[in-house]
Amino acid sequence: MRAWGIGPGRLVIRQGDLTQAETDAVVTAANSRLAGGGGVDGAVHRAAGPQLLEVCRAVVAERGEIPAGQAALTPGFALAAKWVVHAVGPIWKGGVAGEDAALTGAYLSSLELAKGCGARSIAFPAISCGAYGYPLPKAMPVALGALAQGLARGLVGRAELWLFGAEAYQAWCACADELFGPGFEAGA
């Protein structure tokens, strides 16, 4: 686990299972219908329990589908986290359809919702980097820049980025080192 001090907060990058995060809020890479599915979103829904999908359906019935770049908040149910933030990232279309702005929006909307519910710590996946096809080399500086912006604004005290594989973990840490200077090893 590596960390960087940014403004009054801390960015942490770690390898592991996002559903095990012991933060106030956990972000899932949601689809616009908040309907669960595969990858991280499916794992979060399974770990939180069936109540999560029921509440998500009610949110969509009230608000409509959530557009890319925005997020919605629900309770965490069986997760250690009190809250789940459902961030809708963009589908990669070659970088010509506002993907960077939507990805930035997904991260910042999540941080703003966390602040609004009183969360001081939040755990993120690599939004849009799986089935939505956002190329990792393009997504990393956008996502890390958005997290740094939110930390500098004091939206949360700690933002964690949870990555499943060692290769992704190393790539994100290298990008963070380039953007913010050398990180430091952080204990659990």
Image (spheres, rainbow, N blue to C red):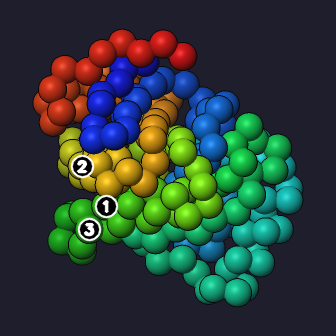
Whole-number angstrom distance, CA of label 3 to CA of label 1 = 5 Å
Q: In terms of secondary structure, where does tag 2 sit?
A: helix
- Disc 3 vs disc 1: Cβ atoms closer than 8 Å? yes
Residue nearest the viewer, comparing 8 with 34: 8
Q: In terms of secondary structure, where does tag 1 sit?
A: helix
Q: Position of residue 120 (x, y in %)?
A: 54, 45
Task: Identify the residue under disc 1.
Answer: 104
Of tags 3 and 2, the one toward the viewer is 2
Task: Identify the residue under disc 3.
Answer: 101
Residue nearest the viewer, comparing 93 with 59: 59
The structure residue drawn at horizontal position 62% and vertical position 73%, both measured from the top left corner, is 33
Whole-number angstrom distance, CA of label 3 to CA of label 2 = 11 Å
Q: Residue furthest right?
A: 50
157 up-or-down from 74: above or below = above
- Disc 1 vs disc 2: Cβ atoms closer than 8 Å? yes
- Tell me which label, 1 or 2, sits earlier in the chain: 1
Quadrant housing the N terminus: top left
Q: Work out whether residue 43 can be spotted.
A: no
